[in-house]
Amino acid sequence: MTGFDVQQFRQHFAFFQQQPDWVYLDNAATMHKPDAVIDAVSAFYQRHNSNVHRGAHRLSQQATAQFEQARATVAGYINARNNHEVIFTSGATAALNQIAFGLMHTVLQPGDRILLTQLEHHANIVPWQLHCQRYGIIIDVVPLTAEHQLDMVAYQQLLQLKPKVVSFSHISNVLGHIQPVAEMVRQAKAAGAITVIDGAQGIVYQPADMQQLDCDFYVFSGHKLYGPTGIGVLYGKSQWLETLTPIFAGGEMIDSVSFINTTFNKLPFRLEAGTPNIAGAIGLSAAIDWLQNYNIAQIIEHKLLLLKAFYSGLSAIKGIDILSLPVHNAGIVALNVDGQHPADVAELLNQQHIAVRAGQHCAMPLFSYLAQHNSAQHGAVRCSFAAYNTLDEVNRCLLALEQAVEILTA
Ligand SMILES: Cc1ncc(COP(=O)(O)O)c(C=O)c1O
């Protein structure tokens, strides 16, 4: 018993009433939305729909107030120093692209180094690579240990090469491992680097405190935190946000425009060109407000209970190769049935209405590494748990996996 009432929690999700047959274990891809979020988005469209920061009428002023209140809610949730340190983007991918592009144009010089890790999502690799090739910047990569954890000794050694930027994920979207981000930021700062954290999975596990972490940038997507798709957050310290060259240019982000020259608006607007996702921001803030009714420590405990039950069940099934470690794990488990394609396993689960993801999970460099060590030639099956999952669902998944092993290896 954790003190967390999962049945009460589930009642806030229309999805589970509409689709009672489904066991949804694809939460690392996207989460379901509580009614509070769906209601907030539809209330905005039904009652307040207007553009922000530009209307001469009261509806627009109300929409602007709601939108800016959403920014304040996000800033409060991550303990940013100022509301203008929260830039709304379309998601973590857009935020990482903005940082990579923005730094490449201003801070980075040919011959500079960027430090990434072996387990990054493509969204924290390709934006850097795209610009590195053009600007002659070198990417170094922190390797993993035999247990598939970041090699912190190698990290320290690579920091001695004095990278200008160090960018890493808070939690691996494939393995679920929680990285020692506070220590990584501390060491990177001591080496003089700008620190970027991909918090797409991290923020879901627990709120991240920007002032405590002291990173320069932190990004995440609303849709993985019970919010709508199409909204994300780029947090940055003011001094770094001021430095970024905007990746998008157009309305709202300018101060004055002529055909000779353009001057830019102040933060946060200079990095939010065009009409923002107003309903998305309002939905994300509704998700955060709603989530704050719950005790995060109890939610974590509940997820750990599910994880423990899942691992214990998996260990009793012969022929399963588990790639994720059970410790320092946020509730994401990558596994394979020995010798079988993960898509075949996922399809057998799908036939029993169990939703998981199979493949390389936008982390091909991680799988090139894992493939040298075990069964991960074609990727892996990923089961990712959320607070609304139950022990019954864990057991249904275990039974389906056991049957999959029998069918595929018969
Ligand atoms: C660790 C990580 N980074 C970045 C992303 C990209 O997020 P989005 O597709 O919402 O922009 C994801 C999505 O799965 C992720 O898990």
Image (cartoon, rainbow, N blue to C red):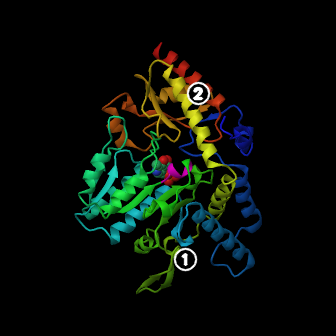
Badge 2 density bin: few <14, some 14–19, many ≥20, Cα 10 Å: many
Query: Mark 2 belongs to which amino acid?
Result: Cys
Q: Is residue 123 visible?
A: no
Residue under numbered circle 1? 252
Dot placed on the residue nearer the N-terminal end, 1 or 2: 1
Dot 1 and dot 2 residues touching (CB under 8 Å): no
Residue under numbered circle 2? 397
Using the image, determine if residue 278 lies above or below residue 225.
below
Using the image, determine if residue 272 lies above or below residue 407.
below
Residue drawn where x is 77% and y is 66% of the image = 47
Q: Where is residue 377 in the image (x, y as percent from the top left)?
A: 36, 31
Q: Can residue 170 be seen in this view?
A: yes
> From the viewer's perspective, is 323 left or right of 55?
left
The residue nearer to you, when weighing 196 against 224, is 196
Task: Check the picture and name the quadrant holding the N terminus.
Answer: top right
The residue nearer to you, when weighing 381 against 240, is 240
Q: Position of residue 327 (x, y in %)?
A: 46, 36
Using the image, determine if residue 49 lies above or below residue 21.
below
Q: Position of residue 275 (x, y in %)?
A: 58, 70
Q: How much space separates mark 1 and mark 2, taking CA atoms?
A: 49 Å
Residue 181 magenta:
no
> From the viewer's perspective, is 362 left or right of 136?
right
Badge 1 density bin: few <14, some 14–19, many ≥20, Cα 10 Å: many
Which quarter of the figure has residue 9?
top right
Q: Give the label, 1 or 2, closer to the camera.
A: 2
Boundaries of the magenta span: 199-204
The disc at residue 133 is none
Query: Mark 1 belongs to which amino acid?
Result: Glu
Helix, strand or loop for disc 2: helix
